[in-house]
Image (spheres, rainbow, N blue to C red):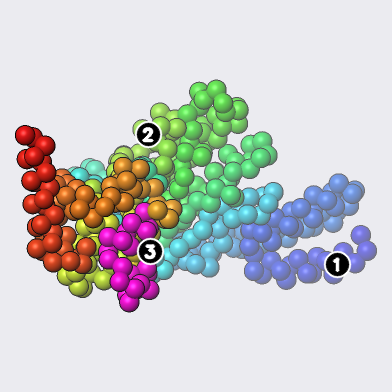
Amino acid sequence: MEHFAILKSLVRVAMAHDTPPLRHQIERLAEAMSAAGETKEAAALRRTLSTSAREHGLTPSRIAKSNTTLEAGERLTSSVPVPVDKESSANLATVTMPEDIHVSLPLFPNSVQENIEALIQEWANATLLGEAGMRATQSVLVYGAPGTGKTTLALWLAKSLGMPVVLARLDGLISSYLGTTARNLGALFAFANRYECVLVLDEFDAIAKVRDDPNEVGEIKRVVNALLQNMDSRDGHGITIGLTNHEALLDPAIWRRFEVQLSVPLPEFEQRIEIARRFLDDHQERTLPEAKLLSWVCDGVSGAELQTMATKYRKRRLLQASSGYTAIQTVTQLARSTSVHISAEKRTEIESDEATLTRQLASAEQKFSKVELAMLFECSTKTIARRLDLASEDGGANAE
């Protein structure tokens, strides 16, 4: 090949900053040259790749002893290249360092909170457990409806441990080429096993579907088998967190690979109040009735949807400050227009006339006091009392 010496020098210079995408393109060039009959030149390129691999592979990152794993892994830094899909050069994962994780622990029911605290306690006392012949939990499956805080929880756990997150990217992992998805899984797990990190598998059901699903082709069986093998190889190397909205789709063998299986339910009434207050001005006492109203109308929605509702409510109240709209009217407007999945029952109730709605809120399971109702309707407590008294009289008349 004419000018091959110059090309070889360019490759050698580029390999000083060895990255998976660069290596992939040089491998493609070597394959193309072999196909064109330029076998000597192709062999020279492959020797350059091999030499660079040895040089980089023998220079490990600083080893840091982990408090939570059985084996210490290398220290993962933001400069470490992540594995890529050989066909597309797409990254198989993204890496987030603990100092770049800015999340708060979502508000969960007490049953979930207790399990989270137990996990943290295990990891904080891994040495004590080791001395007793046990180890801290190394695999957690978190499942529940969309918007319940599963991804945020995984990030928060990693931040609490002070460990980087290796978040699997499905767009890179899953390939249309036969056998490539299984190969990508192997590369991802090999990477996670080498470094001290928390491996997070979001939308886990995409690669862990039940193998006897008649709607799936044989490739999914190979993928699940590869996943099971890689999860077994992960044992003792670090922490793995799987996240899914569709736990019913998971292969039964997958469940056994997770030591802790944590169901995250939709938020209860009290959690919804606190979620709403986080996105309102929670330093003012007047926001409590507003948060309570949002919690009432958002019965059965996820925490993420409630956040959207509370944020929209706060913006609209700010812009309507001089318009004379009450809190009730603003929530009624939002119930008609928002993307939040408010139930048809709640939409009907919130759109009732003021007298009917007053009675509904006062008699709801989570009763609103007369003071709270007066703040929401922006009227006096006497007006609220009058509405409720009239309702009592109507009820007595109807009884007669």
Q: Secondary structure at mark 3?
A: helix
Instruction: Rate crowding at label 2 as few (under 14), some (14 to 19) or many (20 or more) other CA atoms within 10 Å.
Output: some
Q: Which residue is mark 2?
A: 255
Report the span colored magenta.
315-335
Of all residues, the one furthest to the right in this rendering is 2
* Label 3 vs 1, first from the N-terminus: 1
Relative to 260, 184 lies left or right:
right
Front-lying residue, 52 or 160: 160
Q: CA distance from mark 1 to mark 2?
A: 55 Å
* Label 2 vs 3, first from the N-terminus: 2
Image spot of residue 289 (x, y percent): 19, 62
Image spot of residue 64 (x, y percent): 38, 63
Report which quarter residue 23 is drawn in. Answer: bottom right
Residue sitting at x 13%, y 54%: 387
Q: CA distance from mark 3 to mark 1?
A: 63 Å
Image spot of residue 362 (x, y percent): 14, 51
Residue sitting at x 64%, y 69%: 17
- The answer, for residue 158, to whether it is visible in the render is no
**Callout 3, which amino acid?**
Lys
Overall secondary structure of the magenta section: helix
**Residue 312 has which mark?**
3
Q: Is residue 399 above or below residue 278?
A: above
**Callout 2, which amino acid?**
Trp
Is 200 colored magenta in this rendering? no
**Residue 5 has which mark?**
1
Choose mark 3 or mark 1, whichever is in front: 3
Q: CA distance from mark 2 to mark 3?
A: 39 Å
Residue sitting at x 28%, y 50%: 352
Instruction: Rate crowding at label 3 as few (under 14), some (14 to 19) or many (20 or more) other CA atoms within 10 Å.
Output: some
* Label 1 vs 2, first from the N-terminus: 1
